[in-house]
Each structure stands twice: as structure tokens, then as C-alpha cells.
Image (cartoon, rainbow, N blue to C red):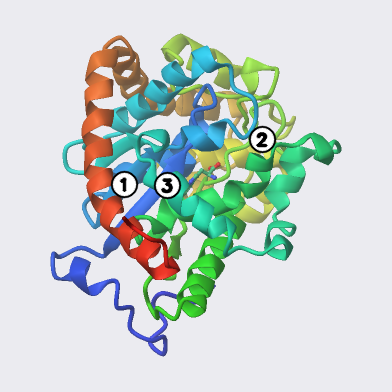
């Protein structure tokens, strides 16, 4: 992807309005309401959301329409949507300054997605690796929505002409597709610079948090063992127990980065420590080099309880107050719609639709 800081790149006409307000741009990000949030979701995405709000105008979306591309029990969708909103708030996102909302409450996402279904090419969609992974062997039986998922994601971003999207490794390809759709729309309809070519914002350490039972596998909500992950709502005892039982190897703590990289379980725990402490991994390795895992694990437990305890407690508190969470989501949806509606109107006009 082109470098935002590359001085030879053409100036981005979408940035000026934000720069005039002392901001770097507009961010849109989405999280699916598909069940328990864990440490990987927190360190890889949600924690960063709060950190971005001083530099960017931010829209944070609970993507319920993406969630149903695979089966969701209808009775679970509302509590899961509130859980994600509660996590945003507990992580420090200011719901009055920014918009926190659920995707289905802003119909312009779906409306733009249909247009994008007609812009994106089958050849592009066929290259999406996440579809192949999620559809598995029985591709004939995957939903059409799962196939179109990346075009809806492009609509989430471009319905606000978002200039930046924070992305982990696994969403890079979808952001590339979003950029391809923006460029093709601008070209096909001869509206240069109508949609921005959205830039990725990549975060450093520990965007990849691995399973506590197997340092070569990603931490995942679908792992049958709850000991493989730290859930955001785990209390101090659960956190301590899971770290105590986390897989290690028989050697003392690694002495160098190279040594750590060859030992996935140790590397994962060191990465988690570094991310929670906001320190470099090399620095953490130097501190614990050659020590016993037991000593490191008790330091990691203290750190995790200090950093995650308040977030989990605040989430629990908010989940007992759904009326408040819903009021945040309602205000967020209103704010988001006010931004999306005029952009959709421009798109409809550009495409040539009659507006009687
Ligand atoms: N596909 C993203 C994920 O599974 C969620 C998502 C949907 C998203 N729309 C988005 C992320 C827009 C960033 C921007 O993690």
C-alpha cells in the first residue's frame, strides 16, 4: 500500500477539512457482535480506538449485518451488540464526542453496499482469503452475504468517506478491496476524488495475541478451551488462574528477541506483557532474561489484573444498564446518519437514480 507520508504522493483533498480542525482525518472501524470479547480483540483493536480519538474524528460501528453472514441466534444478537458497545465505552471511547452505533441502525450502509456490489468484480471477490477460510470446504453452502462481506465493509468505510481505518493483519486484504472499489467508482462515474483512497493505520506490538494453550494459534472465541483466552469480562481470579496454567516450555525465560521468536508460547506471553505495559518487547525480555517462568507469570498476572480489571468491571457495570448503552447507540446512529445521508444522496445522483 502507498505510504501516507510519501512526499511524492499527490496531496489528499479529503484531509484538508480535518486538518483545518486540528485533526488528522476521519476514522471508521467495526467490530462484529459474535460473542465473548477477549484480550486479542482488546489489544489488537478496541484499546486503540480510545487512543485515536484525540487525533481523529471517530466512528465506531458494531457490525451486526456482518455478524449474520454466518448463523447467529436471533436472541443473542442484541446482548452481543450491547456487549461490544459496552467494551468501547469501558475502553475509554467517549460516546458523546464520537459516534458509537450499530450498523443496521444506519441503513445507508446497506444502500451503498448494493451499489458497491455492482462496482466490485467477481474476480476481486474470488481472491478474498477470509471468505475461503470462513466458507471452508462446503463453499456451495456459504451465504451470499459472506461472499459479499467485503463490499459491505467497503460501504461501512466509504459511506463516511473515512480517510483512515485501523486494521490488523487479517483485514488488510479487505481494506485493499475498499481502495479498489473507491478508485473504480471514481473512474467509472468520472467523479475524480469523490471517494477517498482510505489509508490503513497499523498498530505495532501485540496486534497478534495467540492462544494461552498453543502459542502458534491465534487467541479465538471459538477455541473450545476457555483456558486458551482471557475474556474481557474475566475477574482477577480467572485471569490469575489462566496465566498460571498458560503453556510455557521447560527452559528459563528467553534472553534475546531471536531466542524468544523460536519459542512461541514464551514469545506470546512476552508480547502480551509488553503490550499491556506499553513497553517494547526487547525491553521486557531484558528485564526477565534467564529468570524462571513462575516469576514472570506472577508479574504478568499483576499487570493484567491492574490493566484489564477496571475495563472488565466497567463492562459488567454497563451490561447491567442496557438503557444507558442503548441511549449511546441511539445518539451515535443519529450522528452517523446525519453524515451518511448526504453522501448517499450524492452517490445516487452520480449513479443516475431518479429521486421523485
Ligand atoms: N471485517 C472486520 C472484522 O471482522 C469488521 C469490520 C466490518 C470492519 N466493517 C469494518 C473493520 C470497517 C474496519 C472497518 O474484524
Q: Is mark 2 within 8 Å of ligand 1?
A: no
* Mark 3 vs 1, N-terminal side: 1
Per the image, label 1 sits on a secondary structure element best described as strand
Q: Which residue is labeled 1 in the image?
A: 59
Q: Position of residue 150 (x, y in %)?
A: 58, 51
Per the image, label 2 sits on a secondary structure element best described as loop
Q: Quadrant location of the C terminus?
A: bottom left
Q: Which residue is labeled 3 in the image?
A: 109
Farthest residue, direction bottom: 8
Farthest residue, direction front: 356
Q: Position of residue 253 (x, y in %)?
A: 62, 38
Q: Residue at 59% x, 46% y: name it.
A: 149
Q: Which residue is labeled 2 in the image?
A: 252
* In the depicted structure, whether residue 292 falls above or below residue 115: above
Q: Is residue 252 visible?
A: yes
**CA gap, disc 2 and disc 1:** 45 Å
**CA gap, disc 3 and disc 2:** 52 Å
* Quarter assignment of residue 125: bottom right
Per the image, label 3 sits on a secondary structure element best described as helix
Q: Position of residue 18 (x, y in %)?
A: 21, 66
Q: Position of residue 76 (x, y in %)?
A: 51, 15
Front residue of 5 and 110: 110
Q: Residue at 61% x, 28% y: name it.
A: 293
Which is more foreground, mark 3 or mark 1? 3
* Mark 3 vs 2, N-terminal side: 3
Amino acid at each position: 500500500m502507498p505510504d501516507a507520508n510519501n512526499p511524492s504522493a499527490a496531496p489528499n483533498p479529503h484531509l484538508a477539512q480535518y486538518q483545518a480542525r486540528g485533526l488528522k482525518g476521519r476514522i471508521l472501524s467495526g467490530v462484529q457482535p459474535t460473542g465473548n470479547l477477549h484480550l486479542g480483540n482488546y489489544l489488537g483493536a478496541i484499546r486503540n480506538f480510545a487512543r485515536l480519538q484525540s487525533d481523529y474524528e471517530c466512528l465506531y460501528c458494531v457490525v451486526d449485518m456482518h455478524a449474520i453472514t454466518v448463523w447467529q441466534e436471533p436472541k443473542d444478537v442484541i446482548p452481543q451488540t450491547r456487549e461490544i458497545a459496552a467494551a468501547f465505552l469501558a475502553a475509554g471511547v467517549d460516546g458523546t464526542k464520537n459516534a458509537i452505533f450499530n450498523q443496521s441502525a444506519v441503513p445507508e450502509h446497506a444502500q451503498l453496499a448494493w451499489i458497491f456490489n455492482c462496482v466490485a468484480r467477481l474476480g476481486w471477490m474470488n481472491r478474498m482469503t477470509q471468505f475461503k477460510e470462513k466458507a471452508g470446504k462446503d463453499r456451495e453452502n456459504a451465504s451470499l452475504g459472506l461472499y459479499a462481506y467485503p463490499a459491505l465493509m467497503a460501504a461501512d468505510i466509504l459511506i463516511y468517506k473515512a480517510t483512515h481505518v485501523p486494521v490488523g493483519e487479517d483485514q488488510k486484504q479487505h481494506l485493499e478491496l475498499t481502495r479498489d472499489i473507491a478508485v473504480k467508482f471514481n473512474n467509472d462515474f468520472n467523479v475524480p476524488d469523490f471517494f477517498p483512497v482510505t489509508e490503513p493505520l497499523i498498530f505495532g506490538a501485540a496486534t497478534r495475541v495467540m492462544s494461552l494453550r498453543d502459542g502458534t494459534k491465534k487467541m479465538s472465541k471459538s477455541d473450545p478451551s476457555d483456558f486458551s483466552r482471557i475474556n474481557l469480562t474475566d475477574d482477577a481470579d480467572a485471569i490469575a488462574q489462566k496465566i498460571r496454567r498458560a503453556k510455557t516450555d521447560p527452559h528459563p525465560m528467553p534472553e534475546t528477541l531471536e531466542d524468544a521468536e523460536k519459542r512461541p508460547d514464551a514469545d506470546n506471553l512476552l508480547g502480551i506483557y509488553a503490550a499491556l505495559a506499553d513497553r517494547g518487547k526487547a525491553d521486557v525480555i531484558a528485564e526477565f532474561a534467564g529468570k524462571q517462568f513462575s516469576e514472570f507469570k506472577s508479574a504478568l498476572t499483576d499487570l493484567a489484573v491492574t490493566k484489564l480489571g477496571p475495563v472488565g468491571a466497567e463492562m459488567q457495570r454497563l451490561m447491567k444498564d442496557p438503557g444507558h448503552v442503548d441511549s449511546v447507540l441511539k445518539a451515535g446512529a443519529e450522528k452517523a446518519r446525519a453524515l451518511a445521508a448526504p453522501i448517499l444522496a450524492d452517490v445516487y445522483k452520480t449513479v443516475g437514480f431518479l429521486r421523485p
